[in-house]
Structures are given as structure tokens and as C-alpha cells.
Image: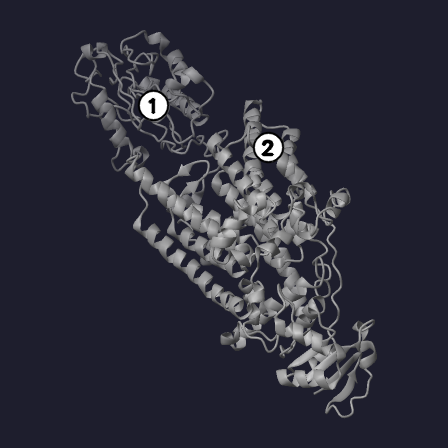
Amino acid sequence: MTTDQSAPGGPRPTSRNARATGGPAPGGTDQRYRRDPGDEIRANASDEAGQGKATGSGPADADRPTRKRTSADDAPGKKAGTSADPAAGKTAAGKVAKGRDADAGRGTDRGKNAAEKAPAGKAADQGGVAAGKAAATGKVADQDEVALGKTTDQDKAEAGSEAEAKSKVGDEDGTGQQDEAGKKDRGRKKASGGGAGAGDSGTPDGKPATDGSKPDGTPAEGESKPDPWAAFGPAPEPVPTWYGRLGRWAGRLLIHEWTLAAIASLALAVLMTWPTLRYPAHTLPQDYWDPSLQAWQMAWSGHILLTEPAQLWHANAFFPERWSFAFSDTLLGYAPAGMIGSGPEAALVRYNIMFVLAHALATFGAYVLARQLGASRTGSAVVGAAYTYAPWLLAQAGHLHVVSNGGIPLALAMLARGHGWSLRHGYRPERRHEGWVYAGWLVAAWQLSLGFGIGLPFAYVLAGSVLVAAVIWYAKRIFWRLKRPFGQRLFVADLIGGLIFAGVGVLMAIPYFTVTQLHPNAERTIGDIAIFSPPATGFVTAPAESRLWGGLHEGARSLLPWHPEMTLLPGFVLYALALGGLFFSIWKVRQRLLLLAGVLVAMALSMGTELFGGRFTYVPLFDHLPGWSGIRTPGRLMLWATLLLGLLAAGAVSAFAERVREISAERIPSWPSPWLRLATLVPLLLVIAEGTNTTPHPVVPAQPAAMRSVDGPLLVLPSGQNHDQPVMLWSTTRFQDIVNGGSGFTPRQLDDVRRVTMTFPDQTSVDYLRTLGVRNVLVLRDEIAGTPWEVSVDAPVDGLGITREEIDDVVVFRL
């Protein structure tokens, strides 16, 4: 950049860093010319790039080409300055773009017009100072730049016009300038108002404006008033408090997919099991026989673990039998709930709450498993609803140990996640996490503690899965030379978790094997299995509790020998979706065929001895697998067929949902219509509709007052399977020993008691009861109509050594 050329051959600086005399150097003590700290860096970069600029040593310098290298440090609108002719006052100022030479000696009468037409960010020094480009921050450009405000003897006559031009340029800078590159997209980028050009006085006292404001101090157009406190330094970063972090964590947790899925599962469970929670202290779902037994089981386990844990398996029922808690599935996993409250009403409330929660857990567990395997959210929701509310399960509403199956899919999902495996994506070692493996084994052990009726097949499926996975793993390493990491920590987690699961199974199996030794009639025979084996028509027959199909299938149910355990319809909607999943699915063809094979195997086993007499299906398992003979009803294996059918259906629904997303992506704008969104929910709504029920909720007989005051051991008459289960529930107030009891089998001693006491009170029955240790006998007047006790209850007891008294409607005989 050249200096004042008002007269030919005028003085020029002899050094690239020299400044015209009479003007303070930028960066000096004069506050008017204090520059931005980054100017030095940008100026140095500009100096290195502008090797072709005029040095100010002679007229020839004006003819040298001016070159400028752009840099990330260059602010928009900043270009190398050009020389001007201040003597003429009309020399072209700053008219340089992309390597054009600055013509220092160009016509003197064009200077003023050129200054007005100069690109944004350039300022023409018409006072003879040869000011080039000035940055938005007040930067003084290149090495040939002359100190602002210099006035020589030759340009004093032009001082007035110079000040006017400077003020004009300053106003233009404040309203937003454009750089040379901005010419291509004029109007898109505006300066932030951070500074003025070279000739901008900026403020009334002549200081350069650094904030883009007008000379009068007001903000430029489109600019907000600067914060006066910013001069003291930036505001410190806020330090989050513990409650702030806790609130953010809670917020993220509340909107997490698993949280929303759990809430939706619980809401659906309350709706689908209604009116279970309408009168939870007085009613039970399905009937009050088996549910009363299971309510007692939860109450007993919680009570005894708080008082005498060593007596867990020796319950107060079936006195004087030992190991009586193992006469049926124990629901031991619900013992923590049994520790809350006491008495029959608390037991009923507890049962109804756990009944609803069991449905919610089943839905959530199946959803999580499907998601882990690779299904979409909608497809996973279909699995959860179908697995929990399949029509055949409506007949099992009175069996909490069958309904409590949510730990099965949940444990499988956790184990799959811990091992980094999914059905859709295969094995991904980077996703392994031993914490999920521990959690999966613990959930599996908890599921096993709820009962062997559902837990034993699960244990064998889990063991088989581990065996198959191990064989495939080593086969790929040995024969296919496929080296895939597994990890020592993951192996230890599997080893410890597997031992915990096996330990729980062994500890629970010991009492049951003891019971089979003490009571040979407790063990099932193949003939017992044949009684409960459903025919093939059971797979298309719904139970009476199905709201949609119950009435329509009444004729088909009448042909079944024991329809509560033989109506195995998983849902016609589920059948249709699974069939579609064989042809249109996110799963691979090989995976679909494996799922289909699993469905067929599970259905074949569910038929028990009905399929070729069970010789190739159920009988080998019955004969060779430990504990399998204790399973009375093979139809409950339909649980596995339902889960696999749900996964097939999830493949089809997920593929449909993905296709909807593809269609929506092709739309402009990319947004699906409401009808497309609703279409993805139709399969879920149909599955839920088919699972609606008409399950009855009878009122449980009230506890007699005598049960709260009479000590045991005692016997309540009349006694029988259905009569004794409510008696067990009544005993939860004091847990006194009672001879009564109901379970999957009847001990021979209890059978003898029922037979001998048919003539009570007489000498034979009294002596027999005394031999057993019974101290009191309660006869329920409202239950003895049509029985031998209807007459004998008021017979004389003289000579028997017993007394009789009445407490409300109960006659108490004290032996």
C-alpha cells in the first residue's frame, strides 16, 4: 500500500513498517488507535502473503501486482488495501479484487465515486493517508498501511472533505458490510457491526468504533445494545448442584423407552384384568379355591421367613404332615410381598396386586425380549400383548404360578443383551456386558422359585440353549477358524450366574423329592398325563372366559374331556400375523424356519400323549428328564409356542413398520399421514381385543370369628379340596396348625381324617383326632347342609370327654 501521492514524487516511507510522520503508530499509547489483539496475527499472515505489494520505495511499486492469500483468520469483508491519491482527492481507493493491481496514479477525478462504490469492508483514505482495508475490529491492514488520521501539508486543503468521507464510510460500516466473497451471494451475510473501516472516525472524539455503533453511540440497525457488564469478563460456567443432576437424571429416566414400556404394561394390565383391583380385599379372579391356596402360600412364606426361617417347608396346613409347603408350587419368589400385612384381607389384597403385576411383567418381559432380538417397538408390543393375553391363558386366571411367567422372557432378554447377541444382528462382541449376564441369571433363578410347573421347562430350555451356544461357538473356532472374543469376565459371570441358578433349583428340588419319597401318590404317572392331554382341536378352541370367542366355541369345548386345560387357542390374529411373518419379515429365512420349528415342537409337546401316544415327544421327556414327571398338565407348554408365534408375528409387523417409514421418507414433506400411523397399530389393537375376558371375580367367604380366637391344632368341618383352601386362607391371622389343606394331591392321612370324621362327634373319630394331636374341631353351620354333620352337630357329647360351644355360626368342640 502506498502513502500520500498528492504531488508527484512526494515523500514515501522507506520501510514496510514505517508510518507517516505526524501520526501515532497503532498500538502506541494513543488510545484512539489501539488495535484488536488478533490484528498482529492477521497482519503477519497478510504480510507473508502480500509479497507483491508496494514497498513505498518508488513509483514502480505501484505497478507491482498485489497478491493476497486468504486465511481462516481473515474476517469477512477484509481485503488488502490499495493506494489512493489524496492530493487529487479523487483517486480510486480500495478497488482491488482477487489479485488486481492497485493503480496508485489513476485519474484524480474518479476518487470520490470510487470511494462510494468500494466493496464493504474497505475504506478509502481520501485525506492522503493511503488507508487500505480495515477489519471489523478496527484492524489496520498490511505492511504499507499508513497511520490513520495523518494530515500532510499537501492535503490540508482536503481535510474537510476527508472528514466527511470518513464519517460516511463509518455509517456504511455500521449497517453491515460485505467482503469480496460476499459479492457472489449478496445480502446473505451481514457484518456483525464489530468495527469500522479505515477512514471511520466511529465516535465523536475520533476513536475507531469497535462495536459497530454509529458515531452518535447508538447501536447500528439490526444490532442489540451491548452488555456493559461484559467488559468485566465472561460469566462463569454454572456448576450443577446435586439436586439439579438428580432432576435431570430423573427426567431422562422418566422418558426412557423401558420406563414408558413398563408404565404402558402396567396400565394395560390394570385394564385387561379389571375388576381385579375394584374390590381387592374381598374378591379373587376366576374362583376362590386355588387363588385362596396361593394367597396363603405368599402369606406363609413371608410370615415364616420373618419368624422361623428353618420351618419354611413345614407349613401350618396338613397337620401333622411334614414338608407340606412342597405339596404344590410355592410362589416362594413372592415371599417379600408376604412380609407386608397379616390376616385374610391383607392376603387377598396382596394376591390381587401380584396378579396384576404378573400380567404387567409378562408384557414388559416379552416386549424387552423382542426389542433385544431386533424387532421394532410396534412389533415388540404385539409380542408382549400376545404372550400375556393369549385366549388360552384366560383359563389359567386362577393359577398365579402359571400367570407369573414374565421372568422367562425378561431373563432371556438380559442374557442375550449381556452376551451382545440379537436375532437380527447376530453376535456383536463390542456390546457384551457382564452386568446384564448376572442380572439375567438372577431373574431366571427368581422365576424358578415361583414354581416348577413353569420353571422346570424353562430350566431345561435354558440349559439346552447354553449347550447349543457352546457347541456352535467351539465348532466355529475349530472347523471354521472363526476367532471371536468372548472374555474372561463374561465367562466368570456365566459360571457364577449358572451356579446360582442351579443352586436355587437344587435347594428347591430337595423338598419335592422328599415329598415324592414320603408320598408315592404325589408322583404322576403317564396315565395321569393322558387325562390332561389336549387333542389337536384344542389349538383352535377358546376357553369360556374369552369375551370374543367364548360363546362361539361352547360346542367345541363340550367335546373336550377337561376343557380348562385343553382350550389352547393362542389367538387367530396371532396365527395370521405369524403366518405372514413366514413370508414378509425382518428375520432371515433361516431364522423364520427355526422359529416355526420351535412352534411345532412346543405344540407337539403340549399335546402330551395325544400325538402318537407321546412315544416320540412327551414320553421320552417324562421317562428321562429329572422332575418332568411332576408336571401334571402338558398343555401349559403352550406358553413357549405362544412366545415363538409372537416373535414370528413381530417380524412381520416390524417389516410393515419399516415400510411405512420408507414411504413417509419419500413424501414431501417427509411425514406419514395419520392413516399410515394408525395402520401400524392395527395388529396390536386386534391382539389386545382378542385377549379381552369375562373372568368372574367371586367374593371370598368371610373368615369366621372362631378362626381368630381358637388355638390349634384344629380341624374345620366339612373338609374337602375346595373347602380346605379357604380354611388355609383364614388361618393367616394366627397361622395355628390346621389339619385341613388343599394341593395338587391329597395325602393319605388327610384322606383318612376326612373318612373317619364323617361320623363326628363319636368316640372313634374323637379318639383318632386325639391320636393326631388335634385339640379343637370347628363345624361350620352354613356349610353342613346335606351332610352327616347337619344332624350330628347337635348330638349329645356326654361320655366323650369333650365340650361344645358356639361362636357365631361356628360350633367349637374342644377335645
Q: Which residue occupies 40% across, 22% down?
A: 169
Q: Secondary structure at mark 1?
A: loop
**For residue 416, which numbered disc appears in the image?**
none
Q: Which mark is residue 78?
A: 1
Q: Counting other residues with Cα less than 10 Å from the Cα at mark 2, is it few (<14), some (14-19), or many (20 or more)? A: some
Residue closest to the eye, 789 or 71: 789
Q: Which residue is found at the position 27% from the left and 9% from the top? A: 105
Q: Point out residue 639 in the picture as x, y percentages from the top left corner.
A: 58, 48
* Rendered view: 358 above or below 536: below
Contact check, label 1 and label 2, Cβ < 8 Å: no
Total residue callouts? 2
Q: Secondary structure at mark 2?
A: helix
Horizontal side of residue 728 vs 208, given as left or right? right
399 or 525: nearer the eye? 525
Q: Residue at x 64, y 82 (%)?
A: 713
Q: Position of residue 576 (x, y in %)?
A: 63, 34
The x, y position of residue 161, in whole percent, is 38, 18
Q: Amino acid at mark 1?
A: Lys
The percent coordinates of residue 283 (x first, y second) are: 73, 63
Return the mark for residue 579. Answer: 2
The numbered mark, 1 or 2, whose residue comes first in the sequence reads 1
Q: Where is 508 relative to 164, above or below? A: below
Residue 343 in view in this figure: no
Q: Amino acid at mark 2?
A: Leu
